[in-house]
Image (spheres, grey):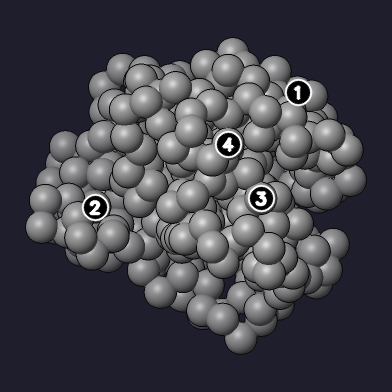
């Protein structure tokens, strides 16, 4: 097969600015393939921090993903949820890869060259629109592994963006005593209830935190949650998360705040409550689990959960790659109107 001679790539070039650039696409090397993108998902976490100029420019984009080498300084290509089809293969690549539907941790781009070792074949029966959620589902699985929810626990989740909703979907399958979520936007709160949350509140409401605490039961928790997830990306939410967590409870922090500072009230009940703050990030697996869990096992579970949850229903907007600027403006200026936004090629 003949490789495409040119591809279209999206670059972040400054705060609030993205640009599309033509890039030559070479023939695949011996162990490489050419992938034509079908769709890619925009991250409302890291990508919006980059778009808004809030990511630390000197920090490596991702040391574990080949396609994201370099720093977060402008200009840069970024993105990590792409589904496409293999349209050309290198001489040493098994012929079975030709035409295969694959997932890649790759920036937004119409065509790209990749080593087959950096691609994940999409299992039969999973549509591209569901497969594009793999990275976020893997993250949700990792949150569950790090939080280690226990039967009968009371759990609170701050943030019902895509990752928050997928985390709620996993937690709702467990026999929890109470699952309460919080998000600023009604669209996301409705989706959260559909997934099985017992209640979903607006964290900006004046009585939100007292109401959450009133819903939590059991003398062993001192009226607080056994476990709280902070997945909203809002530093203020971390203070709220601590406030609703009970004695010996744990707060799993999945948000990345970039250059945003966090102001926490640790002078009140926190000190005597033995609350644990746990950092959770998907690039690694918790050390205490690595004897049994590998990234391959985590991916296998994430694929199964995609088949069960079918998250494609949360794609609220789809834009051609050439109209990417509109997509980012929507997420930046009107976040309450969207859940998952995808770019198509």
Q: CA distance from mark 2 to mark 1?
A: 32 Å
What secondary structure is marked by label 4?
loop
Give the number of the mark in front: 2 or 4.
Answer: 4
Circles 2 and 4: CB distance less than 8 Å?
A: no
CB contact under 8 Å: marks 3 and 2: no
Q: Residues within 10 Å of mark 3 (few under 14, many from 20)?
A: many
Q: Earlier in the sequence, mark 4 or mark 3?
A: 4
Q: CA distance from mark 3 to mark 1?
A: 25 Å
Examine the image and state in which quarter residue 206 appears: top right
Q: CA distance from mark 1 to mark 4?
A: 29 Å
The residue that mark 1 highlights is: 187
Q: Nearer the viewer, residue 209 or 281?
A: 209
| Quarter occupied by residue 102 | top left
Among numbered discs 3 and 2, the one appearing first in the sequence = 3
**Residue of label 2:** 295
- Tell me, for residue 243, which label it has, or none: 3
Q: Position of residue 205 (x, y in %)?
A: 86, 35
In the image, which is nearer the foreground, mark 4 or mark 3? Answer: 4
Return the residue at label 4: 223
In the rendered image, residue 146, in percent from the top left (x then y), is placed at: 35, 51
| Foreground label between 3 and 2 | 3
Q: Residue at x 59, y 13 (%)?
A: 194
């Amino acid at each position: 097969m003949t490789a495409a001679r040119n591809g279209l790539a999206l670059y972040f070039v400054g705060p609030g600015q993205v640009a599309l650039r033509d890039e030559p696409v070479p023939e695949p090397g011996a162990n490489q393939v050419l992938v034509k993108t079908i769709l890619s998902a925009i991250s409302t976490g890291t990508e919006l921090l980059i778009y808004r100029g809030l990511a630390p420019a000197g920090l490596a984009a991702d040391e574990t993903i080949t396609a994201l080498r370099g720093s977060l300084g402008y200009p840069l290509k970024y993105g990590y949820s792409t589904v496409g089809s293999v349209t050309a293969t290198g001489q040493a690549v098994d012929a079975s890869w030709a035409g295969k539907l694959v997932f890649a941790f790759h920036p937004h781009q119409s065509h790209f060259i990749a080593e087959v070792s950096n691609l994940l074949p999409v299992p039969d029966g999973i549509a591209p629109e569901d497969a594009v959620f793999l990275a976020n589902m893997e993250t949700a699985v990792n949150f569950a592994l790090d939080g280690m929810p226990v039967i009968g626990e009371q759990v609170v989740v701050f943030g019902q963006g895509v990752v928050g909703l997928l985390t709620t979907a996993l937690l709702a399958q467990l026999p929890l005593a109470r699952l309460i979520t919080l998000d600023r936007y009604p669209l996301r709160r409705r989706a959260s209830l559909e997934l099985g949350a017992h209640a979903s509140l607006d964290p900006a409401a004046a009585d939100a935190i007292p109401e959450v605490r009133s819903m939590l039961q059991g003398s062993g928790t001192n009226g607080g949650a056994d476990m709280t997830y902070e997945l909203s990306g809002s530093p203020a939410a971390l203070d709220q998360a601590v406030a609703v967590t009970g004695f010996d409870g744990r707060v799993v922090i999945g948000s990345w705040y970039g250059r945003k500072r966090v102001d926490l009230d640790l002078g009140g009940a926190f000190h005597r409550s033995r609350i644990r703050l746990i950092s959770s990030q998907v690039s690694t697996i918790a050390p205490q689990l690595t004897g049994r869990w590998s990234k391959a096992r985590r991916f296998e579970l994430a694929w199964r959960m995609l088949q069960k949850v079918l998250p494609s229903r949360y794609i609220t907007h789809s834009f051609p790659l050439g109209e990417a600027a509109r997509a980012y403006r929507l997420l930046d200026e009107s976040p309450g109107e969207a859940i998952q936004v995808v770019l198509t090629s």
